[in-house]
């Protein structure tokens, strides 16, 4: 191992090493905490950024996992310190956890910058914690390693295997149709999530940890280990040992997150059947690292990357636990090795080719060969047209193929409450060809671009046996969801995007093979509507929401804050210590 750092050049030495009054104060406070000087002086100080809370079930095992990380750090000769970070959970954070992803990114960046940390272990997994932690740590620039929370165990009820999110939606539709009793509903509720860990479908959580893994930010294959598996504990300890070595090697994020690493991550995401949320987060993460990534880049990769992970919701039969037993992410990457740049190096400091050399698929129905994909193209597709000039995304493999080319009249809702009241009306004037549209649900309009994009099927159609229809919104959709849902329409309607001009009854045409989405309204009529349109009242008058609304970028740019993007200005240097 080539050592590039010495005890004298550690970042933490600025706090502890000089023989002056300021360092005396720092060392004195460390002694106040019960540490002797030999515990921390001259050793890499490792921050363990822990996004645990008592309301975040995905991270319920993190208090224990912190101890595993500390054990590894101590074994490698480092000094571990746990640092609490914002716990952005999906289940309880309203109106949406996406409203706070950038807050976590800012907190992470400033926490690292303002404390004597030589390297960090980032503990996350619930959807927004992965991009939030990575975005902040990338900008801070110290060596980092990501510890993924891991998926929960598969759900069970009366002999049926349940998948989080996707089965919740499925059985809710059946309950609305009168096919699920109170007793069955309670049983499903208790059986669908039965251990710590993130959603066990290929939702946003598993998508984003897989992206971090494929980008080289985790120990190879770490994202596949179930949260409740003893291997997850060993992985935590290994993260602690490795981050100490990374500090001595001065292996910083900019040396890992290259254009090639980002491209690898995008290809792997497509092959896994990734969540549509991957678009927003991957673009934001890449731009923080100075790598330009666009919707068109992702669509181009999606056109040529087969979906080979047979995991719900894009797959039909399996969950993340099965994916792990089938060989996990390394096995999937082995299947598409010829499409990846295996010369890239991640947190191990070794080329990806070494990690893939021994990877093996143990069940080729879960992780398919390229000759037998789940879907012939990747998970996502980009649409453009007069409804979405800056783009919109759809997950083709998760919807009925009959909607790939579809034309029908719009039924437009300006708010979620308006939509929810209407779809429960059994006399609603709606047909299977109707296109449901929800607007004012984007980054500024939501606010925060909530996961409202999987609009419920109207009860009038549910009763007749229909379970899918074309739906369009400027919102996002949970990665555990499915259906013919067009999302992330940009620009959003709240800022005057074309979706704001659509009226109920207008004909919408989607042509997925040709990647187009249009309202069949002539330009003269659209010009009249635009002249009559007025901006809605702003959602926030003060506080974080006001700050968010003023600076968040649109979906096609990653929804980062404009002043946090790399191109806005150089990152702040080291803090003054006097």
Image: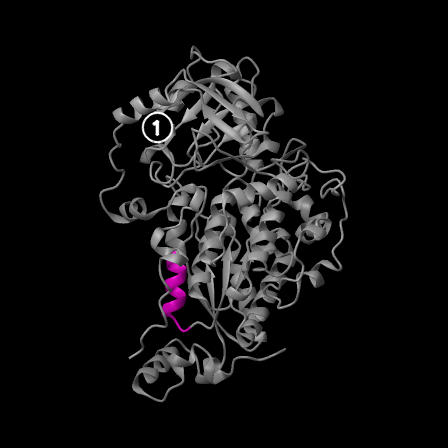
Give above or below for 509 relative to 118: above
Q: Is residue 501 left or right of residue 452?
A: left
Residue that badge 1 annotates: 500
Give above or below for 511 relative to 228: above
Give yes or no for residue 108 being in the magenta stretch: yes
Give yes or no for residue 576 being in the magenta stretch: no
The residue stretch that appears in magenta: 106-116
User: Quick one: label 1, few (<14), some, or many (20+) residues within 10 Å?
Assistant: many
**Quick one: which residue is furthest to the front in this view?**
524
Q: Quadrant of the C terminus?
A: bottom left
Q: Position of residue 67 (x, y in %)?
A: 53, 65
**Quick one: which residue is furthest to the left in this view?**
541
Q: Is residue 201 visible?
A: no
Q: Number of marks in the image?
A: 1
Q: Position of residue 247 (x, y in %)?
A: 53, 73
- Kindly indicate the quadrant of the structure image that contains residue 214: bottom right
Q: Is residue 370 left or right of residue 36?
A: right
For the point 66% across and 62% down, which residue is it? 343
């Amino acid at each position: 191992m080539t050592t590039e750092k010495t005890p004298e050049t550690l970042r933490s030495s600025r706090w502890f090493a000089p023989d002056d009054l300021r360092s005396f104060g720092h060392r004195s406070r460390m002694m106040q905490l019960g540490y002797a000087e030999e515990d921390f002086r001259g050793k890499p100080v490792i921050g363990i950024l822990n996004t645990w809370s008592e309301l975040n079930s995905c991270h319920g095992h993190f208090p224990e996992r912190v101890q595993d990380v500390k054990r590894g750090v101590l074994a490698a000769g480092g000094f571990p310190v746990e640092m609490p970070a914002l716990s952005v959970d999906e289940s309880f954070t309203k109106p949406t956890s996406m409203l706070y992803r950038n807050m976590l990114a800012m907190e992470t960046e400033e926490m690292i910058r303002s404390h004597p940390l030589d390297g960090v272990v980032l503990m996350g997994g619930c959807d927004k914690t992965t991009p939030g932690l990575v975005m902040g740590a990338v900008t801070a620039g110290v060596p980092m390693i990501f510890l993924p929370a891991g998926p929960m165990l598969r759900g069970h009820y009366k002999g049926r295997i349940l998948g989080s999110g996707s089965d919740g939606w499925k059985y809710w539709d059946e309950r609305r149709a009168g096919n699920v009793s109170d007793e069955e509903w309670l049983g499903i509720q208790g059986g669908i999530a039965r251990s710590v860990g993130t959603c066990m479908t290929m939702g946003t959580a598993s998508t984003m940890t897989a992206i971090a893994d494929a980008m080289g930010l985790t120990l190879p294959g770490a994202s596949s280990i179930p949260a409740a598996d003893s291997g997850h504990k060993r992985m935590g300890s290994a993260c602690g040992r490795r981050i100490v070595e990374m500090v001595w090697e001065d292996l910083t994020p900019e040396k890992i997150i290259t254009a090639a690493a980002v491209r690898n991550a995008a290809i792997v995401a497509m092959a896994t059947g990734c969540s549509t949320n991957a678009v927003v987060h991957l673009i934001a993460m890449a731009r923080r690292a100075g790598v330009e990534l666009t919707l068109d880049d992702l669509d181009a990769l999606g056109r040529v990357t087969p979906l080979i992970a047979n995991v719900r919701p894009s797959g039909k039969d399996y969950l993340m636990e099965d994916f792990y037993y089938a060989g996990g992410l390394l096995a999937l990457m082995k299947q598409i090795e010829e499409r990846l740049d295996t010369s890239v190096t991640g947190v191990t400091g070794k080329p990806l080719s070494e990690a893939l050399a021994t990877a093996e698929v143990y069940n080729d129905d879960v992780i398919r060969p390229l000759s037998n994909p789940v879907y012939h193209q990747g998970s996502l597709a980009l649409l453009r047209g007069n409804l979405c000039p800056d783009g919109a995304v759809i997950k083709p493999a998760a919807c009925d193929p009959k909607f790939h080319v579809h034309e029908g009249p719009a039924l437009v809702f300006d708010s979620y409450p308006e939509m929810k009241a209407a779809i429960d009306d059994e006399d609603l004037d709606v047909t299977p060809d109707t296109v449901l549209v929800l607007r004012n649900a984007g980054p500024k309009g939501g606010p925060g671009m909530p996961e409202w994009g999987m609009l419920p099927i109207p009860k009038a159609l549910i009763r007749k046996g229909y379970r899918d229809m074309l739906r369009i919104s400027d919102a996002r959709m949970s990665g555990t969801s499915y259906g013919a849902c067009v999302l992330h329409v940009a620009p959003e309607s709240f800022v005057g995007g074309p979706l704001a001009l659509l009226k109920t009854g207008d004909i919408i045409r989607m042509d997925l093979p040709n990647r187009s989405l249009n309202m069949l309204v002539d330009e003269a009529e659209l010009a009249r509507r635009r002249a009559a349109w007025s901006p809605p009242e702003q959602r926030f008058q003060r506080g974080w929401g006001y700050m968010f609304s003023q600076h968040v970028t649109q979906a096609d740019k990653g929804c980062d804050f404009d002043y946090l993007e790399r191109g806005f200005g150089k990152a702040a240097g080291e803090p003054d210590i006097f």
